[in-house]
Amino acid sequence: MQTLNIDTGVEEFAVNGRGVLRFNPADPNLYHRFFAAGSTLETYDAELTEALQNVAGDEKARTAVGLALLNEYDGKIKKLLTEIFGAENDFDAILGGVNLAGVGANGKRVVQNLLEALTPILRAGAERRLNAIADEATAQADAARAARGA
């Protein structure tokens, strides 16, 4: 059997020395899925915040319910990220099992830190894609002018 190698534009990004995230930063479908997920993430965050505020019972019961809610949030976010970036990206492995509802040293949720790190990569990929389209259009226009002139 022969191997067929196709450039799909997939790049690899080492995340905190633990896992590798693979995706094509110039994939317009991924770009749209990523930025469309913002409202879903805001909804999840609001639901989690409200649910955590409404936990009743003694301290032990509140802690148990709170941890369960954070675990549920983590699962929802990782599922959403898998839908965006593809099933080949296991965010539990990539992030070393860190719960995305957790808070980083900067006071932001881990999921926010992840999204902020990915945003410039995706924007640069979209810019590369747009530049490639513009370059192709310019080349076609130049070829058409050359053909008319010949």
Image: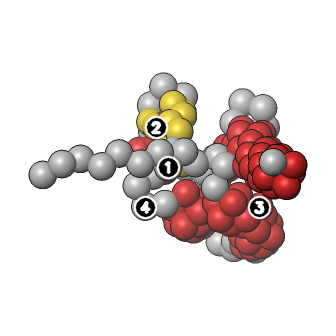
Q: Is residue 38 left or right of residue 78?
A: right
Label 3 Cα crowd, 10 Å radius (few <14 / some 14-19 / many 20+): some
Question: Dot 3: what SS?
Answer: helix
CA distance for labels 1 and 3: 21 Å
Query: What is the three-letter code of the residue carrying label 2?
Result: Val
Task: State if disc 4 and disc 2 touch (CB < 8 Å).
Answer: no
Mark toward the viewer: 1 or 3? 1
Please determine whether, in this image, residue 68 is positioned above or below residue 113: below
Task: State if disc 3 and disc 1 touch (CB < 8 Å).
Answer: no
Task: State if disc 3 and disc 2 touch (CB < 8 Å).
Answer: no
CA distance for labels 2 and 3: 21 Å
Residue 112 seen in this snapshot: no
Q: Tell me the number on the disc at residue 20.
A: 2
Residue 140 seen in this snapshot: yes
Residue behind mark 4: 87
Which residue is at the far left?
1
Which residue is at the far front?
150
Task: State if disc 1 and disc 2 touch (CB < 8 Å).
Answer: no
Of the pair 53 and 128, the residue shown nearer to us: 128
Of the pair 124 and 34, the residue shown nearer to us: 124
x and y percentages locating residue 133 in the rendered image:
76, 52
Label 4 Cα crowd, 10 Å radius (few <14 / some 14-19 / many 20+): few
Question: Dot 2: what SS?
Answer: strand
x and y percentages locating residue 59 in the rendered image:
63, 59
Question: Dot 1: what SS?
Answer: loop
> Which residue: 51% across, 31% down?
14
